[in-house]
Amino acid sequence: MKKNGFVFIETLVVVSVLSLTLLMLFGSYSYIIRKSRERNVFDTTEMIYKTYYTKQILEKEYGTLGTYMNTCNKPGTNVYECTISGNRLTQLKQSFEVEKIYFLTPSEVLTNTGVLVKLDATTIDYIKHLGKYSNTRRMIVKYKKNYQDGTYEVFHSSMEV
């Protein structure tokens, strides 16, 4: 009796089952790692506090957030993109490392691809993280943390306004 063919087929089956198992483990592991990295750059405790104080500084400097929003770019309906420039807000740029401030409703932005095209990728990811069921106007603050070696990291945080 020849059992060489049986041993060969059995080896192929075992190798394919092990390969499939390893691929499934890798897939679930990479998903977990990706989600944990996402949590590290979205709504950290430090950034939530900075966002609260950013709102306080803007209200102190401009009286209301509506007055500040009138000084911003308007890339779409009900979307305001504000860059930090000028002498009035240098504290935000230097101390809090604020890159941009957005005033928008995430559900409206996610349904309007024309506005999404005008935003950067990290901000789009954050708006998707907030979800299309977020129907309240939010102040989203984008922070850019620069390191000594020339690299940087981008964080986002938001609060309802």
Image: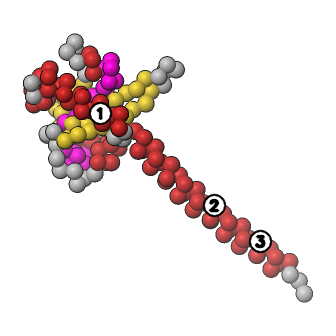
| Residues at marks 3 and 2, CA–CA distance in whole angstroms | 16 Å
Up-down relation of residue 52 to residue 28 (above or below): above
Residue depicted at x 62% and y 65%: 20
Q: Magenta region: which residues?
A: 93-113
For label 1, count other residues whose C-alpha is less than 10 Å away and answer few (under 14), some (14-19) or many (20+): few
**Mark 1 highlights which residue?**
49
**Mark 3 highlights which residue?**
11
Tell me the kind of residue under disc 2.
Leu
Q: Position of residue 27 (x, y in %)?
A: 54, 57
Tell me the kind of residue under disc 3.
Thr
Q: Position of residue 123 (x, y in %)?
A: 32, 38
For label 3, count other residues whose C-alpha is less than 10 Å away and answer few (under 14), some (14-19) or many (20+): few
Residue 102 on the magenta span? yes
Q: Position of residue 73 (x, y in %)?
A: 18, 28
Tell me the kind of residue under disc 1.
Tyr
| Residues at marks 3 and 1, CA–CA distance in whole angstroms | 58 Å
